[in-house]
Amino acid sequence: MGLTYRSVGHGAADTSTAACRRSPADRVIALAGNPNVGKSTIFNQLTGMHQHTGNWPGKTVACAQGFCRTDACEYLLVDLPGTYSLLAHSAEEQVARDFLCFGGADATIVVCDATCLERNCNLVLQIREICDRVIVCVNLMDEAARKGISIDLSLLSQRLGVPVVGTSATDPHSLATLLAALDRLFTTEKQPLLSLPYPPDILQAVAGLSETVADLTGRPDISLFLSLRLLGSDEELKDKISGNIPDTPALRDARVSAQQTLAACGIDAAAYEEAIASTIVRQAEILCCDAVHTSRADTGDRDRRIDRVLTGKFSAFPIMLALLVFIFFLTVTVANIPSSWLSYGFALAEDGLDRLFAAWGAPLWLHGILVTGVFRVTGWVVSVMLPPMAIFFPLFTLLEDIGYLPRVAYNLDRPFRRCSACGKQALTMCMGFGCNAAGVVGCRIIDSPRERKLALLTNAFVPCNGRFPTLLTLIGIFFVGTGIGLSSSLASAAFLTLFVLLSVAMTFLATWLLSRTLLHGEPSSFTLELPPYRRPRVLQILIRSVFDRTLFVLLRAVAVAAPAGAVIWILSNTYIDGISLLARAAAFLDPFAVLLGLDGVILLAFLLGFPANEIVLPIVLMAYTAGGALSDTGSAADLYAILSANGWSAVTALSFLLFSLFHWPCSTTLLTIRKETGRLRDVFLAAALPTAFGLLLCFSVHSVAFLFGL
């Protein structure tokens, strides 16, 4: 069976129910399932796209669509956000629910985790109530086998009345079997919908309403499902259903009659929801009875033993701290050598460009803009940023892949709840360490609008990857020294860890302040599924961390650094009365900057570095060096000499580091906040809040240093 791949792209959460067919003949296939069952991995394998996957819940925060062709047909696969139920509790679950109920998919593939099939079958049963072409894909069969779990797929297929296929997402043969089942699905009759045995009192109460809904919609097969949901507590779903059913007096009377019958039977809203949910849970248990066999009684004992250590009361936080120091230690230790190689390579390339421009007879201003400005700044950004990112991201991805990051969120749940926030904010905060814009988008997984906004407004308090090279560089040359060795690397890692812990503490403080003032309220409860520990997929980790993260962030930084280099060179080399425009702007800002322990050049660099944090230090160096161009520092000692010659001290470096941690987010993050909230007020608040913290901290440090004569 031959496959051809073509990617379509991602849909935003509010528009992802629109499938982008290439032709009317395309079959739209919804890919549904609980979070963390390998859905996105299957999607990637079938469509050839490289959507980021990971071993923690809530990874997919929008719909991804991609084409997959077999010998029989071309399919448009829609990877839906993970959901546990059609009764949605978050914006992302609503996207999945709306597509399944109203998106018009031709068929649905429900992906389940073979290691916990019974729980996954809750969603399978709900989808079988409304979808007449379904394939159940029992994924992670290899992992189940390692745990001594075997599954009778034919018995499940018989009980569900649909094809059941066992897969391992990374095994092409099993995925070919899945596609073959999909082809056969459209050559057979549609599957009769499943009728669940809800309590007799409830069925009696909704009988009249169900008949009315069937008459109005012409769909008697799903009238019971719609009627039950019309009487439920999911107001958003009820509005969606009502929008697809004519609002007639007969429908209104039938709803009132059903509600009265339920009340007469002593069934209030809570009891009604409990009865519906209990029916589904019981049926999932019956479905898996005798179909799932476990040869070992200690299937989950290993994970529980590990969790007792990694999430233990006294061991969780020391282990988190030790891992953080270890990651930064490796980053510091390994990054120096390739960074110097890249710097040397760019210096040789610049010499070649100098000779080339001289041979062309190019004017000095053109050489200055393109070579001294654009190329030199770009080379600096690449040589300084690429090595730390190429080390940090794979290590971070490794922790994600083995399932440790959800444990971090679990450990941080209690501190966030004390701030009247949601524990899921820990997940979005972890995303922010990679990219604050990604962390903002990740806030969609938080159900409560108030808590979602808390996470969104405070995400920029944690440093994104673009700030780490600057932090490491200044820590090394001002607080640790320029030596190379184990002690120096450990000291740098320890210092960086302290700054990261400070950013986390300020996140808690800012969240607490907002929850007590502008966004006051009580924290909501949530359930966080801790995925099983899994063997890391080393090759996928390298590919994902390099292409999905490292190159993405690096290209974004280069795209900003190149024009910024040109602009700064022009400002540095355009003179009015013998003073450059850059010097005039820096002098204007200097009186205010001095109060913060900085100078006008540094503050101007932060302003000009608004498009991306990565270029702040290069701008500072360009402004300090003669001719307004970034000079070849050659080594950390040379860089220290340049900064010291321009009045830098340890206090200046500390103020710079603090302001690097706490100032306005980059333009990409603020634009993302504007898109997510639709309110300029939130954009202003997200920029003002960390900036206020940064100004206060820098002013305090400078004042204390001044009092002690430092």
Image (spheres, helix red, strand yellow):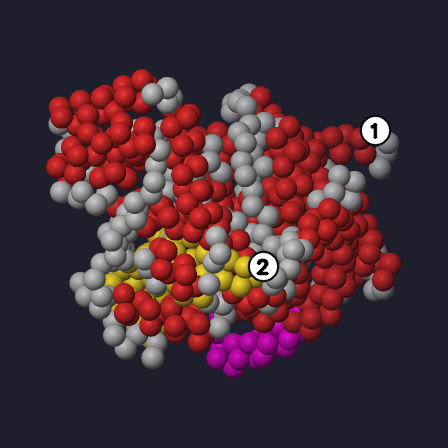
- The x, y position of residue 671, in whole percent, is 44, 44
| The image quarter in which residue 42 lies | bottom left
Label 1: few (<14), some (14–19) or many (≥20) C-alpha neighbours in 10 Å: few
Q: Is residue 100 left or right of residue 49?
A: left
In the picture, the disc for residue 707 is 1
- Residue at 60% x, 25% y: name it: 513
| The image quarter in which residue 485 lies | bottom right
Q: Amino acid at mark 1?
A: Leu
| Quarter of the figure that contains the C terminus | top right
Q: Secondary structure at mark 2?
A: strand
In the picture, the disc for residue 294 is 2
Q: What is the residue that sits farthest to the bottom in this orientation? A: 359
- Residue at 37% x, 56% y: name it: 159
- The x, y position of residue 370, in whole percent, is 51, 67
Magenta-colored span: 343-365
Q: Is residue 347 magenta?
A: yes
Q: Quick check: 441 above or below 466?
A: above
Viewer-proximal residue among 635 and 543: 543
Q: Quick check: 389 above or below 274?
A: below
- The x, y position of residue 546, in whole percent, is 56, 66
